[in-house]
Amino acid sequence: MTTRWIRGAAVAAAMAGGVSACAAPGGGSGGGASADSVVIGVASEPDTLSPLLGYGKDGNSKLFDGLLARDADLKLTPALATALPEVGDDGLTYTYTLRAGAEFSDGEPLTAADVVFTYETVLNEKTNNTSRSELDAIKEVKADGGDKVTFTLKYPYAPFAGRTVLPIVPEHIAGKQDPNTGSFNTEPIGTGPYVLSAWSKGEKLTFKANPHYWGGAPKVKTVTMAIIEDDDVRATRLRSGDLDGAILPPNLAAAFKNDSGKKTYDAKSYDFRTVTLPTTNRVTGDPAIRQALDAAVDREAMADKILDGAGRPAYGPLPVDDPWFTKGIERSQDLAKAKQILDRAGWKADADGVRAKNGQRAAFTLLYPSGDKVRQDHALAYASDAKKAGIEVKVESATWEVIEPRMKDDAVLAGGGSTGDPDFALYTLLHSSLAGDGFNNMGRYDNPVVDKALDTGRRSQDEATRRAAYDTIQRELVKDPGYTFLTHIDHVYVLADRWTGLTTQLEPHEHGFASGPWWNLEDWQPKQ
């Protein structure tokens, strides 16, 4: 999970929505723009560009590098390290050797001290990083000379190497600042293929190629990320030539299928849409309401009609084609079952068709972020399905600034999902120790069986034991749903056809600049 895992198309970290319908932010495909620059429309901008606060923590940052990275097939590969780690002491130590000649964009060399500083700062409780629990296994990080770093773990953590895609920051700059308030948050220095050259809040971020990048100078010299929250506006600006590319909902992307100058890229993802059901709310906190909603929802119709087939029904946080998915938990809409559950729990229909129990109407508010058409459509379909069971869901759009203080008590049409390992996708979403911790465990889900299985899955190296743990979690979520999982959505991108080397990865929830066909932007080549 990311720091703010619920915020739709993102640059790569904690998000804050912004709308821009102004003039071209730079270039665009109109007017014969050159292939060494690109303007991309994304839905959100980051709150920060500091990895110390969560930016780029799952890899693919264009400003920074981790010790490791992931290739097109999500296989771990060396980045700032020369090779995959040497693992010792029965999985309790991981040793990395740093790449010679890697420099930060200010010309200072990368050292082992920078790696130690990065991890120790993220782990410091005074640092406002709500993803700290993802590094819980780390006991100590030590430098051995200038080019070796050893991590000592508290317990064997099978997927630990995947956590070392965390971007490394320069101690000589960030170490002189408060990580929560320092200028590094908006004026970052990294080892990555690009350097931030300008940031107009709510409008655009501009990046320039790093000519001293250890992986070779990128051919695409200028990248502008135009912040356009509204899906329809993003599509209109792409059509007008104001943008070279954009992430779009499937129905809007379909309009470009026959455009010979543009190419559409579809990426499968772990990105789910779900409804949080806060336990503090008198209605959504009722187990019978939650079970009834899970039975009443028509996931297949949402995937077919809302996503136009560019997605799949979600029966839990893991997609059906994930190797860790528990077969047999797939379930279709069952309104008779939903009504039976409510009847048995004492929720009786009133004259207006809305059920009530002890004077409490079965009604609650469902919030979704303004401008997000896919979430809006999911929210409306969810409300329609709930109504058939006698539950009134009042759909309301709002900005994230309005949603955040209300999500403790109000349901939210949320998104999430992480690739790499089931621990990455499930722990921060479900563990009771993280209930209400920023955007972690938004519904304040509290299930001792799930907690125990999450801890077992995290701490065991035995695959059979881990599989049994994650199987338990997925089955328990059917019996005791803390969320109503709806769909896993494909990410659809449309881009001017002026480059070669573009591919997509299996993507997490966080996308936009970090993922999409531009995940390997530094490797693109202009078409001849």
Image: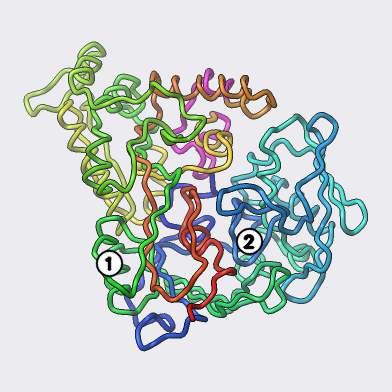
Magenta stretch holds residue 232: no
User: Which of the marked residues, 1 or 2, is nearer the chain's N terminus?
Assistant: 2
Left-right relation of 35 to 376: right
Magenta stretch holds residue 434: yes
Position in image of residue 510 (x %, y %): 48, 52
Label 1 is placed on what type of residue?
Phe
Q: Is residue 506 above or below residue 278?
A: below
Position in image of residue 48 (x %, y %): 57, 62
Q: CA distance from mark 1 to mark 2?
A: 35 Å
Position in image of residue 8 (x %, y %): 41, 53
Residue at the extreme right: 145
Label 2 is placed on what type of residue?
Ser
Mark 2: which secondary structure?
loop
The N terminus appears in which quarter of the rendering?
top right
The residue that disc 2 covers is 50
Residue closer to the observer: 243 or 264: 264
Mark 1: which secondary structure?
helix
Q: At 47% from the left edge and 76% from the top edge, which residue is drawn?
A: 38
Position in image of residue 39 (x %, y %): 44, 75
The residue that disc 1 covers is 256
Circle 2 packing at 10 Å, graded few (<14), some (14-19), many (20+), is: many
Q: CB under 8 Å between callouts 1 and 2?
A: no
Image quadrant in which you'd find residue 227: bottom left
| Residues rendered magenta in the picture | 432-453
